[in-house]
Image (cartoon, grey):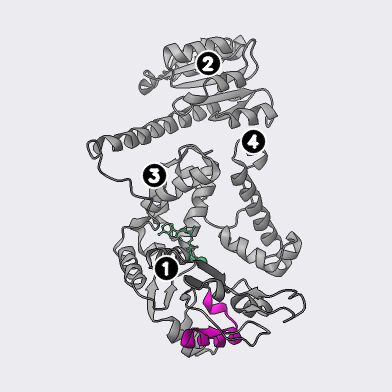
Amino acid sequence: MTNPTNTETTILIAEDDRAIRFSLACALKAEGYNVIEVGNGDDAIARVASDDPDALLLDLKMPGKGGLEVLAALAGQLAELPVIVITAYGGSAAAIEAMRRGAYDYLTKPFDLDEVQLTLKRALKQRALSSEVKALRSRVPDELDGADDQIALPEPELVGQSAAMREVFKAIGLAAATQAPVLITGESGTGKELVAAALHRHSDRTNGPFIRVNCGALPEGLVESELFGHERGAFTGADRQKPGRFERASGGTIFLDEVGELPLSAQAKILRVLQQCEFERVGGTEILRTDARIISATHRDLSKAVASGQFREDLFYRLNVARIVIPPLRERREDIASLSEHILRHLERRHGWGELSISSEALSVIRDRPWPGNVRQLENALARAAIAARGRTILPEHLDAEETLDPSMPNLDDQIESLPLRALLAEVERRAIQRALITCKGNRTKTAERLGISRRQLFDKIREYDLHP
Ligand SMILES: Nc1ncnc2c1ncn2[C@@H]1O[C@H](COP(=O)(O)OP(=O)(O)OP(=O)(O)O)[C@@H](O)[C@H]1O
Ligand SMILES: [Mg+2]
């Protein structure tokens, strides 16, 4: 049965085994494709140049130039020309190398003709989407033609067009003009740290230091010496004097992240800094002064912590002079598209991907999800999807069915040479932690022991990868 929509589509088959080439050509012609057949690598390269095919089925072992050399010769064109490599053995080093060199996918012999058709359809669809994205991108500079005096703006530090985020931006601007303490609240992953940094950058302290303290990650015995410093001999191990973070933040901003986790003893000392701008180092008697501006953040409801006696009421009011509340992502879904764009650009730079894009279907799936882990969870989901899409256009099938613990994931071995190293290492780490959590039924102490890391490291990783034990 001929598919009339395929008649404009040309597929080049490069395969030296005549029987295989013949059966492939017949199957594709039956679907209505235009087919060109060659039996070696040099002819393949020549026909790509002369006939501009829409896809290439490429055997790895051929006389003269083999498939890998053909891929190398076509390196600059692989975004427009999806190449499906045909290899003799599954998972072999050559197949991995082919993926690393930019092949779209690979099939192992003996293959099933339906599988060839399906892979080819996917490759052509992806190619169509990629060129759509390209066309959209290349149109942008045209519209700016004649606007030479327009200065390129730096990348937005915080993304968001929703009314709720515009309120946040306004609040940052207002607070930046003052020296008042600011308390930033919002669920985990909503961007509290980013808001704190923006607040510092926009304030008149921008040239001073921005010192962050993760109050939740400091072991209780070290909180005070970290914040206020210590004198030599103040405790075992204190072999020299050390300035604390309040001291280092003088002239700038100190950011007390997860301030709700501070032990009560440290809370009393911070209150003193807020009231008198003074403090002492641990083990010291000299009274020191700091003019550091205090920004704090918490994902907890501090008024509840006050009610239960875990947080000092007087400190709460002192920290909470100006308040910035960041709404959860599910209450500003109109920001999801631009956030996704922003995140993809970031992934390109960080992991060395080429151009990443997302189809409109995948985007609408994303827009409808609840995102309990907010922007951080969105980042992690897109990073995983980019891996599944092998650094090209993200389609709905590349998104995890559900953001839950799923041990049945594709074999990393197949991707070991086709992924940027950092993406690969992060993925290995995420999976190791996820499996250990499942094995230990969510018990974090056991999981940390099993993985040979501290509980604190485990907590940080769970948050970084947004795992839900
Ligand atoms: N509006 C935004 N624009 C761009 N990136 C954002 C935005 N909001 C959050 N992000 C990104 O999401 C991630 C989480 O943000 P951040 O660490 O600031 O959240 P948080 O509220 O401090 O979370 P937690 O409570 O877990 O510490 C970061 O990588 C940050 O860059
Ligand atoms: Mg944070």
Can see residue 38? Answer: no
Q: Are marks 2 and 1 in contact (CB under 8 Å)?
A: no
- What residue do we see at 49% from left, 25% from top? 76
- Quickly name the residue at label 4: 417
Please tell me whether mark 4 or mark 2 is closer to you in this view.
4
- Indicate the amino acid at tag 2: Ile
Q: Which tag, 2 or 1, sits closer to the chain's start?
A: 2
Q: Quadrant of the N terminus?
A: top left
Q: Is residue 260 magenta?
A: yes
Please tell me whether mark 3 or mark 4 is closer to you in this view.
4
- Indicate the amino acid at tag 1: Arg
Q: What percent of the width, then of the height, locates residue 270?
A: 53, 83
Mark 4: which secondary structure? loop
- Quickly name the residue at label 1: 205
Mark 3: which secondary structure? helix
Q: Are marks 4 and 1 in contact (CB under 8 Å)?
A: no
User: Mark 4 and mark 2: span between their CA atoms?
Assistant: 25 Å
Q: What percent of the width, then of the height, locates residue 241?
A: 68, 75
Q: Residues within 10 Å of mark 3 (few under 14, many from 20)?
A: few
- What residue do we see at 49% from left, 49% from top? 382
Residue range highlighted in magenta: 258-279
Instruction: Looking at the picture, tell me which residue is in the foreground, 358 or 219.
Output: 219
Mark 2: which secondary structure? strand
Q: Is 394 above or below relative to 202?
A: above
Q: Which tag, 3 or 4, sits closer to the chain's start?
A: 3
